[in-house]
Amino acid sequence: MNLINIFKKIHHALPAKRRSQLWIILCGMICMSIGETIVLGSIAFFASVISDTERVLQSDYILFVMNVFNSQWLSNSSNLIICISFVVVLLVASKNGFKALISYWSIRYSAIVEAMFAGKLLSGFLQMPYEWHLSQNSADLILVTANWRRFIGRSFIYSVLQTIADSLMVTILLISLFVVQPIVSLIVISILGTTSFVLFTTVRRKLDRVAVKARNYEQSLNKQATKMIHGFKDVKISGKQELFNTKYTQTLFHISKIQGTQRLISGLPTWLLESMGFFMISFSICYMLIFLDYSVARVSGTITLLAVTAWRVLPAMNRILSQLTSIRNVIPYVEKILNYYKEVEENESMNQAGCEPSITDIEFKHEIQFQQISFSYKNARRFALNQISLSINKGDVIGIIGASGAGKSTFVDIITGLLVPSHGKFLIDELELQSCSQRMTWMTKLGYVPQTPYIFDGTIAENIAFEIDSKNIDTNHVLKCCHMAAMDDFLDELPLGIDSYIGERGVRLSGGQRQRVSIARALYQKPELLIFDEATSALDNTNEKAIQNTIYSLRGKQTMIIVAHRLTTVASCDIIYEFDQGELRRWGRPENILE
């Protein structure tokens, strides 16, 4: 994907307001380039006045000004120099003030676009189908939203805007120089243009390859860091610290080497163009003196204009080449972001109608039904669930058992609305859940307790209410849920009770305590259906028994689904369904299934 196509994609993704702002900034850059030309012309003219005041006093321009204002004040050399110096100072100050304003707009605009893309991506990731998330690497998603977002704003949009601004300035200045001195200008432009083109095309392919390598190594580095931090205990106990550290250090070394190469390549145009610029000035002097037979006075005026132009053009061309190389470096990152953005937009357009707020509330009063439901994951060879039909009555405690890969998790994901059946019907009191909005409404009626609950670094109350802002927490309801989850004993041992901080991933709690926090969180939602997905499988026998007692103490108050490997976990259920290779093998009372 080339630079122009990427810019078109970004422009297309921008809201109408941001597109208008972009064009306003570009118009401002055109005005700034024209102003830059006027300023440089005034500086060159000022230099000519100082070097040959008498000749300037006899020029048609000065005579015209004196006639217009009917004043001979400018006929004095000192007055003329003072007047022109004030005009030059005023023009330079005005130009720099306007340039500062355009730069501020460009920086602010880039930051806004960066924030817009990052916010849209994160919001879009949360709206993407659950099956899509199963195929993604979480480290990549975090990298895109937390780190790579800067590439699309600061490193791409801003660099493109600056490149456009510098290109406009260089173009207008060179055109002006061509009007004043066409032959010399044509030679200078031809040589510098050819040199710049050769420089950029020579390093472009190398930069593209290096940039792709840099992106891949950064992805690898982020994944390695995630493994080491999240799996610290396993890494420590297994004695693999040195192995992980060596791999991480090697990747860091590769990244440092690549970044050094990128900086070297980015610096080459600056050094070469600077040398070429001084060569062209010397060449122009020799050419005008030898071949055009100009006088020294005429050559000095032309060289002054040429030097002043070079003073602005050469740094601008250096910036252009440097910015283009920087843009090439970040293109792989921007492409990745745009690919994610495209997936997010496609998902939004598909669900735009189906995810409108549901008009009819979904109430579970009588029965949940699976009617001939089948489900197959993308690219899977067989159905994860095949022709499943069952019913769950209000108030039932249902047990789901089966070996690994039997289809238990897929069953739970469908009943929670995370997955959509490939075939068949999922009904709540005869209402079929078909649309995205219906599934989203149904999710608000559920309480879910996973095998490994997500506990964030906050207080017990914040984790139960799943709230970061404590103002939104119903403390009385939290305490009630804690009591229902049998948390009273261990809360009494904490000086701050539910306001105690429990650390990242609940490191200050035991496994059983973390599960109780998860149960209380599920109850806080006032669910109509409570799902325990292998909630006790990671606990020891003592904690498992305690959590089982807590779960079954909710009988009569909640409709519950208990998914388990251990048969003892579901021994007190009303009905047990046994899955085997995606099919419903048998079902019935516990005494019939577990005999």
Image: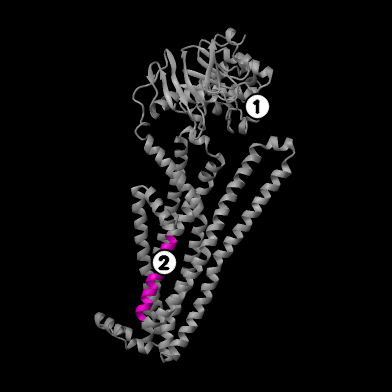
Element carrying mark 1: loop
Q: Can residue 171 be seen in this view?
A: yes
Q: In this view, does 303 lie above or below 416?
A: below
Which circle, 2 or 1, is nearer the viewer?
Answer: 2
Mark 2–mark 1 CB contact (< 8 Å): no
The label number, if any, that marks residue 556 in the structure image: none
Q: Where is residue 222 in the image (x, y as percent from the top left)?
A: 60, 45
Picture quarter with the N terminus:
bottom left
**Magenta residues, dominant SS class:** helix
Is 437 left, or right, of 451 in this rendering? left
Residue range corresponding to the magenta coloring: 161-180
Amino acid carrying label 2: it is Ser
Element carrying mark 2: helix
Amino acid carrying label 1: it is Leu
Q: Which residue, given by chain and number where applicable, does mark 2 sit on?
A: 167
Q: Where is residue 565 in the image (x, y as percent from the top left)?
A: 61, 20
Q: Which residue is drawn at 42% across and 80% down?
A: 187
Q: Where is residue 512 in the image (x, y as percent from the top left)?
A: 64, 22
Q: Where is residue 176 in the image (x, y as percent from the top left)?
A: 36, 75
Which numbered disc, 2 or 1, marks the residue that appears first in the sequence?
2
Q: Residue at x 58, y 11 (%)?
A: 593
Give the number of marks. 2
Cα separation between marks 2 and 1:
61 Å
Q: Residue at x 41, y 90 (%)?
A: 292
Picture quarter with the C terminus:
top right
The label number, if any, that marks residue 509 in the structure image: 1
Q: Nearer the viewer, residue 110 or 392?
A: 392
